[in-house]
Image (cartoon, rainbow, N blue to C red):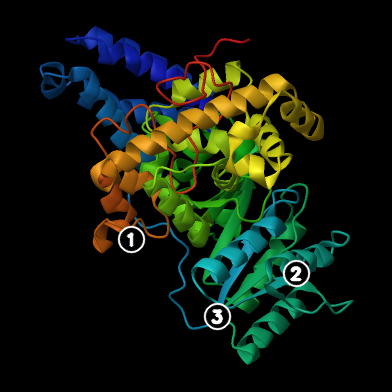
Protein backbone atom coordinates (compact mmCIF):
# COMPACT_ATOMS: atom_id res chain seq x y z
CA UNK A 1 0.00 0.00 0.00
CA UNK A 2 1.14 3.57 -0.79
CA UNK A 3 4.00 2.26 -2.98
CA UNK A 4 3.28 4.75 -5.78
CA UNK A 5 2.91 7.68 -3.41
CA UNK A 6 6.04 6.75 -1.46
CA UNK A 7 8.07 6.63 -4.66
CA UNK A 8 6.82 10.00 -5.90
CA UNK A 9 7.28 11.76 -2.56
CA UNK A 10 10.71 10.18 -2.18
CA UNK A 11 11.84 11.81 -5.43
CA UNK A 12 10.42 15.20 -4.41
CA UNK A 13 11.96 15.23 -0.96
CA UNK A 14 15.24 13.77 -2.21
CA UNK A 15 15.76 16.98 -4.17
CA UNK A 16 14.94 19.10 -1.13
CA UNK A 17 17.42 17.25 1.07
CA UNK A 18 20.20 17.95 -1.39
CA UNK A 19 19.72 21.73 -1.26
CA UNK A 20 21.74 23.82 1.17
CA UNK A 21 19.18 26.62 1.11
CA UNK A 22 15.58 26.90 -0.03
CA UNK A 23 13.63 29.80 -1.49
CA UNK A 24 9.89 30.24 -1.43
CA UNK A 25 9.85 29.25 -5.10
CA UNK A 26 11.61 25.97 -4.27
CA UNK A 27 8.96 25.16 -1.67
CA UNK A 28 6.17 26.07 -4.10
CA UNK A 29 7.63 23.72 -6.72
CA UNK A 30 7.95 20.90 -4.18
CA UNK A 31 4.38 21.34 -2.92
CA UNK A 32 3.10 21.39 -6.49
CA UNK A 33 4.67 17.97 -6.97
CA UNK A 34 3.25 16.78 -3.64
CA UNK A 35 -0.22 17.93 -4.75
CA UNK A 36 0.14 16.06 -8.04
CA UNK A 37 1.39 12.92 -6.27
CA UNK A 38 -1.58 12.93 -3.86
CA UNK A 39 -4.08 13.36 -6.69
CA UNK A 40 -2.48 10.52 -8.67
CA UNK A 41 -2.77 8.38 -5.53
CA UNK A 42 -6.55 8.92 -5.74
CA UNK A 43 -6.81 11.20 -2.71
CA UNK A 44 -9.99 13.29 -2.83
CA UNK A 45 -9.46 16.78 -4.26
CA UNK A 46 -10.90 18.66 -1.22
CA UNK A 47 -8.60 16.67 1.06
CA UNK A 48 -5.55 17.49 -1.08
CA UNK A 49 -6.44 21.18 -1.19
CA UNK A 50 -6.90 21.36 2.58
CA UNK A 51 -3.63 19.49 3.14
CA UNK A 52 -1.58 21.83 0.93
CA UNK A 53 -3.25 24.89 2.48
CA UNK A 54 -2.10 23.71 5.92
CA UNK A 55 1.43 22.78 4.87
CA UNK A 56 2.32 25.82 2.74
CA UNK A 57 2.22 28.61 5.39
CA UNK A 58 4.38 26.54 7.73
CA UNK A 59 6.80 25.45 4.98
CA UNK A 60 7.56 28.99 3.74
CA UNK A 61 7.93 30.44 7.23
CA UNK A 62 11.20 32.11 8.25
CA UNK A 63 11.96 29.34 10.76
CA UNK A 64 12.15 26.87 7.85
CA UNK A 65 13.78 28.86 5.04
CA UNK A 66 16.49 30.24 7.33
CA UNK A 67 17.19 27.00 9.19
CA UNK A 68 20.36 24.96 8.75
CA UNK A 69 18.42 22.04 7.22
CA UNK A 70 15.39 23.59 5.49
CA UNK A 71 14.69 20.45 3.41
CA UNK A 72 14.41 18.31 6.51
CA UNK A 73 12.15 20.89 8.15
CA UNK A 74 9.74 20.82 5.19
CA UNK A 75 9.65 17.02 5.31
CA UNK A 76 8.89 17.14 9.04
CA UNK A 77 5.99 19.56 8.41
CA UNK A 78 4.56 17.27 5.70
CA UNK A 79 4.97 14.30 8.04
CA UNK A 80 3.14 16.08 10.87
CA UNK A 81 0.28 17.13 8.58
CA UNK A 82 0.00 13.61 7.16
CA UNK A 83 -0.47 12.31 10.70
CA UNK A 84 -3.25 14.86 11.24
CA UNK A 85 -4.89 13.93 7.93
CA UNK A 86 -4.85 10.26 8.95
CA UNK A 87 -6.39 10.92 12.35
CA UNK A 88 -3.69 12.17 14.70
CA UNK A 89 -1.83 10.25 17.37
CA UNK A 90 -4.82 9.27 19.49
CA UNK A 91 -5.70 5.67 20.35
CA UNK A 92 -7.67 4.06 17.50
CA UNK A 93 -7.74 0.50 18.84
CA UNK A 94 -11.05 -1.33 19.22
CA UNK A 95 -12.78 -0.39 22.46
CA UNK A 96 -13.96 -3.10 24.84
CA UNK A 97 -14.89 -0.71 27.64
CA UNK A 98 -18.41 -2.03 28.15
CA UNK A 99 -20.18 -4.72 30.14
CA UNK A 100 -19.66 -8.16 28.56
CA UNK A 101 -20.62 -9.49 26.18
CA UNK A 102 -19.39 -6.51 24.15
CA UNK A 103 -21.26 -6.44 20.83
CA UNK A 104 -19.31 -5.56 17.67
CA UNK A 105 -21.35 -5.19 14.47
CA UNK A 106 -19.70 -5.57 11.05
CA UNK A 107 -21.36 -3.72 8.17
CA UNK A 108 -20.51 -2.93 4.56
CA UNK A 109 -21.18 -3.84 0.94
CA UNK A 110 -21.14 -7.40 -0.39
CA UNK A 111 -17.67 -8.54 -1.35
CA UNK A 112 -15.83 -6.03 0.84
CA UNK A 113 -14.48 -8.77 3.11
CA UNK A 114 -16.81 -8.55 6.12
CA UNK A 115 -16.93 -12.27 6.93
CA UNK A 116 -13.17 -12.80 6.62
CA UNK A 117 -12.49 -9.63 8.63
CA UNK A 118 -14.88 -10.84 11.33
CA UNK A 119 -12.88 -14.06 11.67
CA UNK A 120 -9.55 -12.19 11.64
CA UNK A 121 -10.62 -9.81 14.41
CA UNK A 122 -12.11 -12.64 16.48
CA UNK A 123 -8.93 -14.68 16.16
CA UNK A 124 -6.85 -11.70 17.25
CA UNK A 125 -9.06 -11.07 20.30
CA UNK A 126 -8.69 -14.69 21.40
CA UNK A 127 -4.96 -15.10 20.65
CA UNK A 128 -3.63 -11.70 21.68
CA UNK A 129 -6.14 -10.38 24.20
CA UNK A 130 -7.24 -13.74 25.67
CA UNK A 131 -10.95 -12.89 25.26
CA UNK A 132 -13.67 -15.43 24.55
CA UNK A 133 -15.46 -14.55 21.33
CA UNK A 134 -18.72 -15.76 19.80
CA UNK A 135 -19.25 -15.10 16.08
CA UNK A 136 -22.72 -14.99 14.51
CA UNK A 137 -23.62 -14.64 10.84
CA UNK A 138 -26.71 -12.54 10.18
CA UNK A 139 -26.37 -12.88 6.42
CA UNK A 140 -29.42 -14.86 5.33
CA UNK A 141 -29.34 -13.57 1.75
CA UNK A 142 -25.97 -14.63 0.34
CA UNK A 143 -25.82 -18.39 -0.35
CA UNK A 144 -23.68 -20.29 2.18
CA UNK A 145 -22.69 -17.09 4.00
CA UNK A 146 -23.49 -18.60 7.41
CA UNK A 147 -21.63 -21.80 6.52
CA UNK A 148 -18.62 -19.71 5.50
CA UNK A 149 -18.38 -18.12 8.95
CA UNK A 150 -18.82 -21.53 10.57
CA UNK A 151 -15.88 -22.92 8.57
CA UNK A 152 -13.73 -19.89 9.43
CA UNK A 153 -14.63 -20.45 13.08
CA UNK A 154 -13.40 -24.03 12.85
CA UNK A 155 -10.16 -22.88 11.21
CA UNK A 156 -9.47 -20.24 13.87
CA UNK A 157 -10.84 -22.13 16.86
CA UNK A 158 -13.43 -19.40 17.55
CA UNK A 159 -16.97 -20.37 18.58
CA UNK A 160 -19.81 -19.66 16.16
CA UNK A 161 -23.54 -19.44 16.81
CA UNK A 162 -25.35 -22.60 15.63
CA UNK A 163 -27.29 -22.08 12.40
CA UNK A 164 -31.09 -22.35 12.57
CA UNK A 165 -32.70 -22.36 9.13
CA UNK A 166 -35.41 -19.78 8.52
CA UNK A 167 -34.43 -17.27 11.20
CA UNK A 168 -34.21 -13.62 10.18
CA UNK A 169 -31.29 -11.27 11.01
CA UNK A 170 -32.98 -9.59 13.98
CA UNK A 171 -33.90 -12.98 15.49
CA UNK A 172 -30.34 -14.22 15.01
CA UNK A 173 -28.96 -11.06 16.67
CA UNK A 174 -31.18 -11.56 19.74
CA UNK A 175 -30.20 -15.22 19.96
CA UNK A 176 -26.48 -14.37 19.63
CA UNK A 177 -26.61 -11.81 22.46
CA UNK A 178 -28.47 -14.24 24.71
CA UNK A 179 -26.13 -17.13 23.87
CA UNK A 180 -23.09 -14.93 24.59
CA UNK A 181 -24.50 -13.99 28.00
CA UNK A 182 -25.34 -17.58 28.94
CA UNK A 183 -22.02 -18.91 27.62
CA UNK A 184 -19.87 -16.39 29.47
CA UNK A 185 -18.39 -14.88 26.31
CA UNK A 186 -16.55 -11.56 26.48
CA UNK A 187 -17.34 -10.46 22.92
CA UNK A 188 -20.06 -11.23 20.38
CA UNK A 189 -19.36 -10.35 16.76
CA UNK A 190 -22.31 -9.84 14.40
CA UNK A 191 -21.55 -10.29 10.69
CA UNK A 192 -24.40 -8.55 8.85
CA UNK A 193 -25.47 -8.99 5.24
CA UNK A 194 -24.20 -6.73 2.47
CA UNK A 195 -25.50 -5.69 -0.93
CA UNK A 196 -23.90 -4.90 -4.25
CA UNK A 197 -24.79 -1.25 -3.60
CA UNK A 198 -26.27 0.83 -0.79
CA UNK A 199 -30.09 0.55 -0.84
CA UNK A 200 -33.02 1.20 1.45
CA UNK A 201 -33.57 -2.47 2.32
CA UNK A 202 -29.94 -2.84 3.42
CA UNK A 203 -30.07 0.27 5.61
CA UNK A 204 -33.38 -0.72 7.19
CA UNK A 205 -32.12 -4.22 8.03
CA UNK A 206 -28.85 -2.97 9.54
CA UNK A 207 -30.73 -0.33 11.55
CA UNK A 208 -33.02 -3.00 13.02
CA UNK A 209 -30.04 -5.15 14.05
CA UNK A 210 -28.35 -2.08 15.56
CA UNK A 211 -31.42 -1.29 17.65
CA UNK A 212 -31.63 -4.88 18.95
CA UNK A 213 -27.93 -5.51 19.60
CA UNK A 214 -26.94 -1.98 20.72
CA UNK A 215 -23.33 -2.58 19.52
CA UNK A 216 -20.45 -0.94 21.36
CA UNK A 217 -18.48 -0.83 18.09
CA UNK A 218 -19.97 -0.59 14.59
CA UNK A 219 -17.22 -1.28 12.07
CA UNK A 220 -17.59 -0.47 8.39
CA UNK A 221 -15.58 -2.89 6.24
CA UNK A 222 -14.49 -1.14 3.03
CA UNK A 223 -12.47 -2.44 0.08
CA UNK A 224 -9.55 -0.05 -0.49
CA UNK A 225 -9.43 -1.04 -4.18
CA UNK A 226 -12.73 0.77 -4.81
CA UNK A 227 -10.97 4.09 -4.22
CA UNK A 228 -13.13 7.14 -3.67
CA UNK A 229 -16.32 5.08 -3.98
CA UNK A 230 -15.36 3.51 -0.64
CA UNK A 231 -15.35 7.02 0.85
CA UNK A 232 -18.85 7.68 -0.53
CA UNK A 233 -20.12 4.39 0.93
CA UNK A 234 -18.62 5.30 4.32
CA UNK A 235 -20.44 8.64 4.31
CA UNK A 236 -23.80 6.97 3.58
CA UNK A 237 -23.38 4.37 6.36
CA UNK A 238 -22.23 7.04 8.79
CA UNK A 239 -25.26 9.23 8.13
CA UNK A 240 -27.85 6.43 8.23
CA UNK A 241 -26.44 3.93 10.74
CA UNK A 242 -23.59 5.57 12.59
CA UNK A 243 -20.16 3.95 12.56
CA UNK A 244 -17.39 4.00 15.16
CA UNK A 245 -14.54 2.78 12.99
CA UNK A 246 -13.41 1.58 9.57
CA UNK A 247 -11.65 -1.63 8.54
CA UNK A 248 -9.85 -1.24 5.20
CA UNK A 249 -9.36 -4.53 3.35
CA UNK A 250 -7.15 -5.59 0.43
CA UNK A 251 -4.59 -2.92 1.20
CA UNK A 252 -1.89 -5.28 -0.09
CA UNK A 253 -3.33 -4.88 -3.59
CA UNK A 254 -3.74 -1.08 -3.46
CA UNK A 255 -0.57 0.68 -4.57
CA UNK A 256 -2.16 4.13 -4.38
CA UNK A 257 -3.74 4.32 -0.92
CA UNK A 258 -5.99 7.29 -1.72
CA UNK A 259 -9.00 5.75 0.01
CA UNK A 260 -7.13 5.51 3.32
CA UNK A 261 -5.84 9.06 3.05
CA UNK A 262 -9.30 10.43 2.22
CA UNK A 263 -11.46 8.25 4.45
CA UNK A 264 -10.55 9.73 7.82
CA UNK A 265 -10.52 13.29 6.58
CA UNK A 266 -13.88 13.13 4.80
CA UNK A 267 -15.86 11.04 7.29
CA UNK A 268 -14.23 12.04 10.58
CA UNK A 269 -14.37 8.34 11.54
CA UNK A 270 -11.06 6.65 12.48
CA UNK A 271 -9.57 3.83 10.45
CA UNK A 272 -8.96 1.13 13.06
CA UNK A 273 -7.63 -1.89 11.18
CA UNK A 274 -5.97 -2.78 7.88
CA UNK A 275 -6.44 -6.11 6.14
CA UNK A 276 -3.07 -6.83 4.53
CA UNK A 277 -3.78 -10.18 2.89
CA UNK A 278 -6.13 -13.14 2.63
CA UNK A 279 -4.65 -15.18 5.47
CA UNK A 280 -6.39 -15.02 8.83
CA UNK A 281 -3.39 -13.50 10.61
CA UNK A 282 -2.89 -10.71 8.06
CA UNK A 283 -4.47 -7.89 10.02
CA UNK A 284 -2.76 -4.76 11.36
CA UNK A 285 -3.70 -1.98 13.75
CA UNK A 286 -3.90 1.37 12.00
CA UNK A 287 -1.58 3.95 13.57
CA UNK A 288 -1.50 7.32 11.83
CA UNK A 289 2.09 8.16 12.83
CA UNK A 290 3.38 4.79 11.65
CA UNK A 291 1.51 4.93 8.34
CA UNK A 292 2.78 8.48 7.72
CA UNK A 293 6.31 7.21 8.33
CA UNK A 294 5.83 4.46 5.75
CA UNK A 295 4.45 6.90 3.18
CA UNK A 296 7.52 9.13 3.53
CA UNK A 297 9.95 6.19 3.41
CA UNK A 298 10.83 6.46 7.10
CA UNK A 299 9.83 2.88 7.75
CA UNK A 300 7.88 1.44 10.64
CA UNK A 301 10.28 -0.43 12.87
CA UNK A 302 7.84 -0.54 15.78
CA UNK A 303 5.24 -2.46 13.76
CA UNK A 304 7.98 -4.75 12.48
CA UNK A 305 9.06 -5.54 16.04
CA UNK A 306 5.44 -6.12 17.09
CA UNK A 307 4.82 -8.41 14.13
CA UNK A 308 7.96 -10.37 14.97
CA UNK A 309 6.82 -10.71 18.57
CA UNK A 310 3.43 -12.05 17.43
CA UNK A 311 4.70 -14.54 14.85
CA UNK A 312 7.93 -15.78 16.38
CA UNK A 313 8.37 -19.26 17.79
CA UNK A 314 10.23 -18.44 21.01
CA UNK A 315 11.78 -21.90 21.45
CA UNK A 316 13.19 -22.00 17.92
CA UNK A 317 14.41 -18.40 18.16
CA UNK A 318 16.22 -19.08 21.44
CA UNK A 319 17.93 -22.14 19.94
CA UNK A 320 19.10 -20.09 16.95
CA UNK A 321 20.24 -17.29 19.28
CA UNK A 322 22.26 -19.76 21.37
CA UNK A 323 23.94 -21.11 18.22
CA UNK A 324 24.67 -17.60 16.98
CA UNK A 325 26.46 -16.79 20.21
CA UNK A 326 28.77 -19.69 19.38
CA UNK A 327 29.18 -18.43 15.81
CA UNK A 328 27.18 -21.35 14.38
CA UNK A 329 24.63 -20.98 11.59
CA UNK A 330 23.60 -23.89 9.39
CA UNK A 331 21.06 -24.32 6.60
CA UNK A 332 18.37 -25.50 9.03
CA UNK A 333 18.70 -22.13 10.77
CA UNK A 334 18.48 -20.38 7.41
CA UNK A 335 15.33 -22.34 6.52
CA UNK A 336 13.73 -21.25 9.79
CA UNK A 337 14.59 -17.63 9.01
CA UNK A 338 13.04 -17.93 5.56
CA UNK A 339 9.87 -19.30 7.19
CA UNK A 340 9.91 -16.43 9.68
CA UNK A 341 10.15 -13.90 6.87
CA UNK A 342 7.13 -15.51 5.20
CA UNK A 343 5.13 -15.30 8.46
CA UNK A 344 6.00 -11.61 8.76
CA UNK A 345 4.57 -10.74 5.35
CA UNK A 346 7.34 -11.78 3.00
CA UNK A 347 10.17 -9.72 1.56
CA UNK A 348 7.89 -6.90 0.44
CA UNK A 349 6.26 -6.59 3.85
CA UNK A 350 9.56 -6.51 5.72
CA UNK A 351 11.29 -4.08 3.35
CA UNK A 352 8.30 -1.75 3.53
CA UNK A 353 8.77 -1.34 7.28
CA UNK A 354 12.52 -0.69 7.24
CA UNK A 355 13.68 2.96 7.13
CA UNK A 356 15.06 4.11 3.80
CA UNK A 357 14.24 0.86 2.02
CA UNK A 358 12.10 2.31 -0.79
CA UNK A 359 14.99 2.02 -3.23
CA UNK A 360 15.70 -1.49 -2.03
CA UNK A 361 12.10 -2.42 -2.86
CA UNK A 362 12.52 -0.97 -6.33
CA UNK A 363 15.78 -2.85 -6.81
CA UNK A 364 14.19 -6.10 -5.67
CA UNK A 365 11.27 -5.63 -8.06
CA UNK A 366 13.48 -4.79 -11.04
CA UNK A 367 15.64 -7.85 -10.36
CA UNK A 368 12.53 -10.07 -10.11
CA UNK A 369 13.25 -10.75 -6.46
CA UNK A 370 9.99 -11.59 -4.74
CA UNK A 371 8.59 -14.19 -2.40
CA UNK A 372 8.85 -16.83 -5.15
CA UNK A 373 12.62 -16.62 -4.66
CA UNK A 374 12.17 -17.25 -0.94
CA UNK A 375 9.94 -20.26 -1.66
CA UNK A 376 12.47 -21.70 -4.11
CA UNK A 377 15.25 -21.33 -1.59
CA UNK A 378 13.14 -23.06 1.05
CA UNK A 379 12.45 -25.87 -1.45
CA UNK A 380 16.18 -26.24 -2.12
CA UNK A 381 16.98 -26.60 1.58
CA UNK A 382 14.14 -29.09 2.14
CA UNK A 383 15.53 -31.25 -0.71
CA UNK A 384 18.81 -31.73 1.17
CA UNK A 385 19.56 -34.47 3.69
CA UNK A 386 19.88 -33.64 7.38
CA UNK A 387 23.64 -34.11 7.15
CA UNK A 388 23.88 -31.71 4.20
CA UNK A 389 21.86 -29.05 5.99
CA UNK A 390 24.10 -29.31 9.05
CA UNK A 391 27.29 -29.35 6.97
CA UNK A 392 26.92 -27.65 3.55
CA UNK A 393 30.53 -28.56 2.72
CA UNK A 394 29.24 -32.06 1.88
CA UNK A 395 27.45 -30.70 -1.18
CA UNK A 396 29.68 -31.80 -4.06
CA UNK A 397 28.70 -31.64 -7.74
CA UNK A 398 26.65 -34.86 -7.77
CA UNK A 399 24.79 -33.94 -4.58
CA UNK A 400 23.98 -30.50 -5.98
CA UNK A 401 22.51 -32.09 -9.12
CA UNK A 402 20.36 -34.34 -6.94
CA UNK A 403 19.13 -31.40 -4.84
CA UNK A 404 18.39 -29.35 -7.97
CA UNK A 405 16.40 -32.22 -9.44
CA UNK A 406 14.46 -32.72 -6.22
CA UNK A 407 13.62 -29.01 -5.79
CA UNK A 408 12.89 -28.26 -9.44
CA UNK A 409 15.72 -25.71 -9.66
CA UNK A 410 19.11 -25.32 -11.34
CA UNK A 411 22.56 -26.05 -9.92
CA UNK A 412 23.38 -22.32 -10.27
CA UNK A 413 20.59 -21.54 -7.79
CA UNK A 414 22.07 -24.06 -5.35
CA UNK A 415 25.42 -22.28 -5.62
CA UNK A 416 23.84 -18.86 -5.05
CA UNK A 417 22.03 -20.13 -1.98
CA UNK A 418 25.24 -21.60 -0.55
CA UNK A 419 27.06 -18.32 -1.19
CA UNK A 420 24.34 -16.40 0.62
CA UNK A 421 24.53 -18.85 3.51
CA UNK A 422 28.31 -18.35 3.78
CA UNK A 423 27.83 -14.58 3.88
CA UNK A 424 25.25 -14.88 6.65
CA UNK A 425 27.33 -17.42 8.59
CA UNK A 426 30.36 -15.10 8.43
CA UNK A 427 28.20 -12.27 9.73
CA UNK A 428 27.01 -14.39 12.64
CA UNK A 429 30.62 -15.23 13.54
CA UNK A 430 31.54 -11.54 13.54
CA UNK A 431 28.61 -10.79 15.83
CA UNK A 432 29.57 -13.64 18.14
CA UNK A 433 33.07 -12.19 18.54
CA UNK A 434 31.66 -8.85 19.72
CA UNK A 435 31.16 -8.47 23.43
CA UNK A 436 27.54 -9.39 24.10
CA UNK A 437 26.92 -9.54 20.36
CA UNK A 438 26.88 -5.75 20.10
CA UNK A 439 23.75 -3.63 19.96
CA UNK A 440 22.59 -5.25 16.76
CA UNK A 441 23.28 -8.69 18.14
CA UNK A 442 20.94 -7.98 21.03
CA UNK A 443 18.36 -6.31 18.85
CA UNK A 444 18.18 -8.80 16.02
CA UNK A 445 19.81 -12.01 17.12
CA UNK A 446 17.92 -13.06 20.23
CA UNK A 447 14.46 -14.45 20.60
CA UNK A 448 11.61 -14.38 23.07
CA UNK A 449 11.68 -10.87 24.49
CA UNK A 450 15.22 -9.97 23.40
CA UNK A 451 17.39 -10.95 26.37
CA UNK A 452 20.23 -8.68 27.52
CA UNK A 453 17.94 -5.65 27.10
CA UNK A 454 16.33 -4.04 30.16
CA UNK A 455 12.76 -5.39 30.64
CA UNK A 456 11.29 -1.91 30.28
CA UNK A 457 12.88 -1.76 26.81
CA UNK A 458 12.60 -5.38 25.68
CA UNK A 459 8.83 -5.39 26.20
CA UNK A 460 8.19 -1.86 24.94
CA UNK A 461 8.34 -1.31 21.16
CA UNK A 462 8.28 2.48 21.53
CA UNK A 463 11.31 2.40 23.84
CA UNK A 464 12.98 -0.04 21.46
CA UNK A 465 12.49 2.39 18.56
CA UNK A 466 14.32 5.08 20.54
CA UNK A 467 17.40 2.82 20.73
CA UNK A 468 17.79 2.71 16.96
CA UNK A 469 20.57 4.80 15.41
CA UNK A 470 19.62 8.22 14.09
CA UNK A 471 18.71 8.04 10.43
CA UNK A 472 17.37 4.51 10.72
CA UNK A 473 19.02 1.12 10.59
CA UNK A 474 22.61 0.82 9.37
CA UNK A 475 23.64 -0.92 6.19
CA UNK A 476 24.57 -4.58 6.34
CA UNK A 477 21.65 -5.85 8.42
CA UNK A 478 22.63 -9.04 10.22
CA UNK A 479 20.28 -12.01 10.58
CA UNK A 480 17.26 -9.76 10.89
CA UNK A 481 14.73 -9.70 13.66
CA UNK A 482 14.48 -12.94 15.61
CA UNK A 483 14.57 -15.51 12.85
CA UNK A 484 14.61 -12.89 10.06
CA UNK A 485 17.29 -13.46 7.43
CA UNK A 486 19.55 -11.06 5.70
CA UNK A 487 17.36 -10.68 2.65
CA UNK A 488 17.72 -13.61 0.23
CA UNK A 489 18.25 -13.03 -3.44
CA UNK A 490 20.71 -13.50 -6.26
CA UNK A 491 23.72 -13.18 -4.01
CA UNK A 492 25.52 -10.74 -6.26
CA UNK A 493 26.95 -7.70 -4.55
CA UNK A 494 24.23 -6.63 -2.19
CA UNK A 495 22.06 -3.50 -2.26
CA UNK A 496 22.82 -1.04 0.55
CA UNK A 497 24.81 -3.73 2.31
CA UNK A 498 21.93 -6.21 2.44
CA UNK A 499 23.37 -9.63 1.59
CA UNK A 500 22.02 -11.12 -1.59
CA UNK A 501 19.93 -8.13 -2.70
CA UNK A 502 21.40 -6.95 -5.99
CA UNK A 503 21.68 -3.41 -7.16
CA UNK A 504 18.68 -3.60 -9.40
CA UNK A 505 20.31 -4.97 -12.56
CA UNK A 506 18.60 -7.83 -14.32
CA UNK A 507 20.67 -10.83 -15.09
**Which residue lies under the disc numbered 2?**
154
Q: Report the residue at 65% width, 62% height from top.
A: 118
**Which residue lies under the disc numbered 1?**
459
Cα distance between the residues tagged 2 and 3: 19 Å
Image quadrant assignment for residue 450: bottom left
> In x, y percent, where is residue 290?
39, 43
Single out the mark in the foreground, 2 or 1.
Answer: 1
- In the structure shown, which secondary structural element does the residue marked by tag 2 occupy? helix
Give above or below for 206 relative to 415: below
> In x, y percent, where is residue 113?
69, 51
Depth order, front residue of 227/360: 360
Give above or below for 165 relative to 398: below
Mark 2 nearby-residue class (10 Å; few <14, some 14–19, many ≥20)? few
Identify the mark nearer the N-term, 1 or 3.
3
**300 sits left or right of 470 in the view:** right
Q: Report the residue at 54% width, 59% height from top.
A: 243
- In the structure shown, which secondary structural element does the residue marked by tag 3 occupy? loop
**Which residue lies under the disc numbered 3?**
186
Is residue 246 something that shows in the picture?
A: yes
Cα distance between the residues tagged 1 and 3: 26 Å
Amino acid sequence: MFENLTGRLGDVFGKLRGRGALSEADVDDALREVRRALLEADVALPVVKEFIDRVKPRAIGADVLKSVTPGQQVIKIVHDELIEMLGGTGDTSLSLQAAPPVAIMMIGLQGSGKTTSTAKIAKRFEARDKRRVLMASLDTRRPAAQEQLKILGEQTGVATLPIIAGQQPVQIARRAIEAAKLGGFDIVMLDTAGRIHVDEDLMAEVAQVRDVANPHETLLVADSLTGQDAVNVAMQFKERIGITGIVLTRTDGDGRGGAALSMRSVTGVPIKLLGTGEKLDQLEDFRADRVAGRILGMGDVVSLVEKAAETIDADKANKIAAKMKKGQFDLDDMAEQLAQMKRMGGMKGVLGMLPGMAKAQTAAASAHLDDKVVRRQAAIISSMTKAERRNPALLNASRKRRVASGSGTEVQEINRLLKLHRQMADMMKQMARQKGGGMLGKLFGAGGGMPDLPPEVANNPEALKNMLPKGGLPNGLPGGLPGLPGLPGAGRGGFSGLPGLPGGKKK
